[in-house]
């Protein structure tokens, strides 16, 4: 049985971890900075979200509060837009920007945005891949290097990576929609829009870093276990 304890491919994991940590730190500091800048409109994140949805002709999405920090998300299953503690009732530029971003997802859903539909379709497979891939690879190793099980694990992990890649255009498009709507509706003005772009740009980097880390992990698996035949 072959078990790698240390090799040069560990650096791929380190690079991915550094990218993820750096992106996470940047979004937190950027959000914190613009959380201190109160919008001229005085609207809260929840109020801004409702106005954006109504301006887009969407009346069947409920804006709700969810506990936590930056746990904001849109759930297409029950059409609920959930805003976190530091967004829902806050009137900062950062809060309105994040609320608008989630509205962007609701608008994507309403318009049948293809990348969002694709991401939704592969969620079940991606979840299975993320859960089962490593156990299959480990079992394959302990069974005397079963290449069949290892390859199946790598393929399933690839599905999780695909989900990360499809997520990128969905998130970038939602942010672009958010900035455009905030500017057009006058919810934010001038430099406030610039601040929102910085907040959403920093948030987008977390998805880029996550995708990069997943790709590097997949590359490591292929280097270590791909192409061997010891069944």
Image: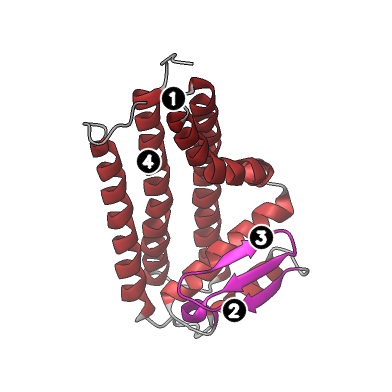
Q: Secondary structure at mark 2?
A: helix
Q: Which residues are magenta?
A: 61-88
Q: Secondary structure at mark 4?
A: helix
Residue name at image x 48 percent, y 21 percent? 147
Comes first in the chain, label 1 or label 4: 1
Which of the labelled discs sits on residue 144, or is there none?
1
Q: Secondary structure at mark 1?
A: loop
Q: Position of residue 108 (x, y in %)?
A: 65, 53
Q: How much space separates mark 1 and mark 2, taking CA atoms?
A: 56 Å
Query: Is mark 2 in CB contact (under 8 Å) with mark 4?
Result: no
Q: Which residue is mark 2?
A: 46
Q: Which residue is mark 4?
A: 212
Q: How much space separates mark 2 and mark 4, taking CA atoms?
A: 33 Å
Let me know if residue 165 appears in the view. no
Q: Position of residue 121 (x, y in %)?
A: 69, 42
Comes first in the chain, label 2 or label 4: 2
User: Front-most of 69 and 3?
Assistant: 3
Comes first in the chain, label 3 or label 4: 3
Pick the quarter of the image with the N terminus. Answer: top left
User: Front-most of 46 and 150?
Assistant: 150
Around disc 4, counting alpha carbons within 10 Å, would you say few (fewer than 14), some (14 to 19), or many (20 or more)? Answer: many
Q: How much space separates mark 3 and mark 2, taking CA atoms?
A: 14 Å
Q: Which residue is mark 3?
A: 106
Comes first in the chain, label 1 or label 2: 2
Residue name at image x 50 percent, y 81 percent? 85
Q: Position of residue 120 (x, y in %)?
A: 66, 47
Vertical placement of residue 1 versus 209, above or below: above
Residue name at image x 52 percent, y 51 percent? 171
């Amino acid at each position: 049985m072959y078990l790698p304890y240390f090799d040069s491919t560990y650096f791929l994991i380190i690079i991915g971890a550094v990218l993820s940590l750096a992106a996470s730190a940047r979004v937190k500091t950027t959000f914190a900075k613009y959380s201190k800048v109160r919008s001229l409109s005085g609207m809260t994140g929840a109020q801004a979200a409702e106005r954006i949805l109504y301006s887009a002709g969407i009346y069947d999405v409920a804006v709700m509060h969810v506990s936590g920090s930056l746990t904001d998300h849109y759930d297409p299953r029950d059409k609920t837009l959930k805003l976190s503690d530091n967004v829902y009732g806050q009137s900062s530029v950062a809060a309105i920007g994040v609320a608008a971003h989630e509205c962007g997802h609701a608008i994507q859903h309403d318009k049948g945005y293809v990348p969002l539909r694709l991401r939704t379709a592969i969620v079940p497979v991606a979840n299975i891949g993320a859960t089962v891939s490593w156990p299959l690879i480990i079992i394959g190793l302990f069974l005397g290097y079963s290449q069949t099980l290892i390859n199946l694990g790598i393929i399933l992990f690839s599905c999780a990576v695909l989900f990360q890649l499809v997520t990128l255009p969905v998130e970038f498009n939602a942010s672009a929609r958010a900035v455009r709507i905030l500017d057009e509706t006058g919810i934010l003005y001038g430099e406030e829009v610039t601040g929102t772009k910085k907040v959403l740009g920093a948030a987008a980097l977390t998805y880029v870093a996550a995708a990069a880390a997943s790709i590097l992990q997949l590359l490591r698996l292929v280097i270590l276990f791909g192409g061997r035949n010891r069944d």
